[in-house]
Amino acid sequence: MPKNSSKTSIFLASCMLSIILLSLISSVILYRQIASLQVAPVRTELVSFINEYEYELMRSTMAFTEAYNHHNDSGEYKEFNTWFNMLLSRYQGLERIEKQHSEIFNRLNLRLLKTNLQQIKLFISRPDILLPANLEMVKQLFNQLVIETHQFQKQWVFQNEGLILAKQNKTLSSYQNSVVLIFVTFVIGIIMVLYLFSNNKKLLILRRTLEQRVYMRTKELKDSNSHLISEVQERKKTELQLMQSQFAAEQAHKKIQYQANFDPLTKLANRNLFLERFAQASIRADRNNTFVALLFLDLDRFKYINDTLGHSIGDKLLQEASSRIQEVLRASDTAARFGGDEFAVILSDIEELHTVNLIVDRILKSMASPFRLCGNDAFVSASIGITVYPTDGKDSETLLRKADSAMYKAKDEGRNNFQFFTAQMDIEANERRLLEAALYKAVEAQEFSLHYQPIIKSDNNGIAGVEALIRWKDEIRGYIPPEEFIPLAEEIGLILPIGEWVLKEACSTAVKWVENISEPFILSVNISSRQFQKCNMAEQIANVLAQTGFAAKHLMLEITEGLLMGDDQQILNQLQEIREMGVSLAIDDFGTGYSSLSYLKKYPITTLKIDRSFIQDINIDTDDDELIKGILSMAKSLNVSVVAEGVETLQQAEFLLENNCLLIQGFHFSKPMPAIEFSQYLQLSDSQPSLELKFKHDRNCA
């Protein structure tokens, strides 16, 4: 296409766009001027307001004349008062309008209006209003108001008419200009269309020519540069590899992000994502005036299942437990795993705490169902501690710490329950932390000691053996009962060094006693199930016996029924190896756990120790009496010895002797004593047969 033709087209198009723009501007101006011709709502209201005021002024003037010319008619007085009160209220409206539109009232003397109205009000309130002079004065005041208002009305109407006429003339002129511009635009547009149509054929011919040239040139390039095709293919391969590498990098990045926010085993949120979700939930709670409940959940007996059934089964249990928790939660809630068997849950947008109770109940019921894992049935429950934002704290660290305290309270209350945090729990948690620190210090400083309680032969009151009982005297708290610190030691892992020390110390001390007594003598030592699960107890016992020189036949280990529940082959192997050494095995607190005849037949148990809770109700609860008789009968049939613990009265001892329970232990005979006192007790019992207790059958023989 020639350059001149191209420039001409550009010029014509520019001119057309410019004129269209001018036409648009003129149309906008015309629209605004036409819009301004409308009488403003404010001005219309003012006209109506002034007209009403003038009408009320004239009616008040007429009513005054009628009322005070016929002053005996009370109805006319009432009509005048009505119109005059309306006139007074209308004046207050004029004052408000004057403040907003002062330019309109430049010619209306509101001060005169106010003065006249006040004088009229003053005159009609006087008792001598009926005097001709006073009546004439009021009429003059009304006439001044009427004249003033009429003149203002005439000037205002004349002014408005002039403004409207000027605007109309100006708008007509703008409209004429806009019509001319639009007409010119239309003519130029027709010229442009004709010009472009005449050049369309030339443009089509030029397009075909260019397309043919491009086609020929492209063909020449393809023929002469075929090697570029292979390069392009190689480049595509390289780009594909780069895309694959980029995709792999993105996937790796997503995996890293996932690992940073989710637990790899359970697929629940981890601590980082949990804290982020809690921050979001707390912001919503502040905005909506709601609550956020934070749950700290621990699986009861998980460590035992993990130790007895294996870590792979434990991992499957954690996965199943996580799924159960997720199923009972709402979509807005968040569950997280903090490690081990500890979980945390955020219940957001809580309006009533009753909602928390319902959700927690569903969690507990879900956890109480059996877990079927690789052919094994596992039974666990959950202990849950609950804190509420913002009631119990404003930050996640505080709420988690308090929820942890509430969780331990739930465990103390028997597990498989939940507890809301209270201030007392904070105190107990602090005491537990102090006790834990003191326990670490006690292990390091060896602050423990052993006391010994004799086991008595009920038939001749001789000493059959002694049970070694650990004691701990703290520098600050004094003596701390074993039932307080032993469970804590098992939980934090200190039971291993403590248990090893107890076994070694008891064997070292009892060596001298065994040498000085002719009767068979048994040293009974309590062993925690954690010791069997965490180390090889058979090897440890063999080492202790070798170091102390204590004979295996004089040693008896007391274990709990819970150790036998897992039916673990490793535990069975250790117990059999220990029994082959000649060491006796006793089940402590028998009757309170889950033992059965099958366990007693499978494991090499030699002695049952009846729990003190059954002994205390002898001759009080007949069910306990029958239960003890049943245990004694069962033990006899299995050729297993029985020791009755917690015997505190002569009646209890007599009942046990009558039912052939030959070994008795309790405060009725002796309290636990330090080693020195027990040595003296041992010597005294050998040298003075008069210490023999008198039982019921002795009295019958007498």
Image (cartoon, rainbow, N blue to C red):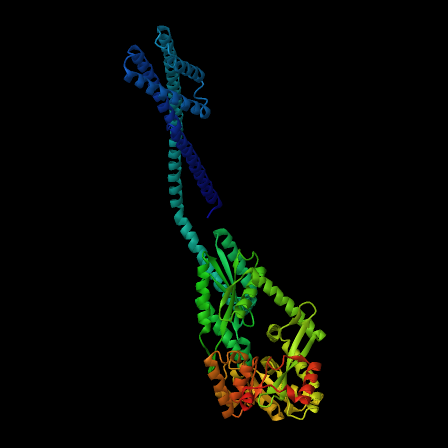
Residue 366: quarter of image: bottom left
Where in the figure is residue 288, as x and y percent of width and height? 47, 52
Q: Is residue 47 left or right of residue 276?
A: left
Q: Can residue 239 be seen in this view?
A: no
Front residue of 77 and 208: 77
Q: Residue at x 54, y 85 (%)?
A: 654
Q: Give the answer, above or below, for where 52 lies relative to 178.
A: above
Front residue of 198 and 604: 604
Where in the figure is residue 86, as x and y percent of width and height? 35, 22
Front residue of 643 and 128: 643
Q: Is residue 534 left or right of residue 60?
A: right
Front residue of 608 and 447: 608
Extreme front residue here? Answer: 702
Where in the figure is residue 130, as x and y percent of width and height? 34, 9
Where in the figure is residue 701, as x and y percent of width and height? 55, 91
User: In the rendered view of the protein, which quadrant contains the C terminus?
Assistant: bottom right
